[in-house]
Amino acid sequence: MRSITRSLGLASGAMALTAATALAGTGAADAAPTGTQSLYAPSALVVSVTAGEDAVNGTVLRAATLVCAPRPGGTHPDPAAACAELRENGPSLDALAAPRPDTACTREWNPVTVTTDGVWQGRRLSYTYTFGNPCGLRSTTGVLFGI
């Protein structure tokens, strides 16, 4: 059963990344003839929230696509703010997983893992962070993982 769940999760992520890449290609920059360079570096990501200590063995709870070039889009609830956070923080996303200073969470162990996989400004990006419980995820400073 675990192998089936993991395969389905990975397949869903691959399909979502394919969809995100297709969404990224809807701009006018794609009209360029073959062999020329696009005006925009590819930026298409899949953001997911998984119940469990790691994304491979956990159960995917939510996932969203995020496209940042040529304009913000995808299924993320706030693509403009999420793209702005990515531009501000680059590939180092730990700042977006940091808790807000005015929040407090219990110390129960009910892990939730967030992942961001895809291409950011033409470079491969893969980020994973595990929160101790859902409260830790809800109390983050950023909107990227707020799917």
Image (spheres, rainbow, N blue to C red):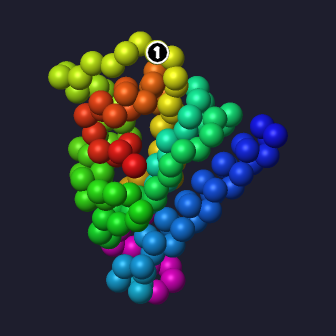
Q: What type is the residue that disc 1 sits on?
A: Glu
Q: In this view, does 93 lie to the left or right of 54?
A: left
Relative image position of residue 95 (x, y in whole percent): 30, 31
**Nearer to me, 142 or 37:** 142
How many other residues sit within 10 Å of disc 1, few (<14), some (14-19) or many (≥20)? few
Q: Main secondary structure of the magenta part?
A: loop
Relative image position of residue 54 (x, y in whole percent): 60, 30
Rendering quarter of residue 92: top left
Whether residue 87 is visible to the viewer of this picture, yes or no, is no
Name the residue located 25 percent from the left edge and 59 percent from the top edge.
80
Relative image position of residue 18 (x, y in whole percent): 58, 65
Quadrant for the N terminus in the image: top right
Name the residue located 54 percent from the left edge and 45 percent from the top edge.
61
- The outermost residue toward the left is 102
Whether residue 31 is visible to the viewer of this picture, yes or no, is yes
Rendering quarter of residue 140: top left
Name the residue located 66 percent from the left edge and 48 percent from the top edge.
9
- The outermost residue toward the top is 107
**Nearer to me, 75 or 105:** 105
2 within the magenta span: no
Name the residue located 35 percent from the left edge and 45 percent from the top edge.
146
Magenta segment:
33-42
Q: In this view, does 128 lie to the left or right of 99?
A: right
Q: What element carries label 1?
A: loop
Number of marks = 1
Relative image position of residue 126 (x, y in whole percent): 51, 42
Instruction: Give the residue number, with chain letter if any, for mark 1.
Output: 108
Q: Does 109 appear above or below 80?
A: above
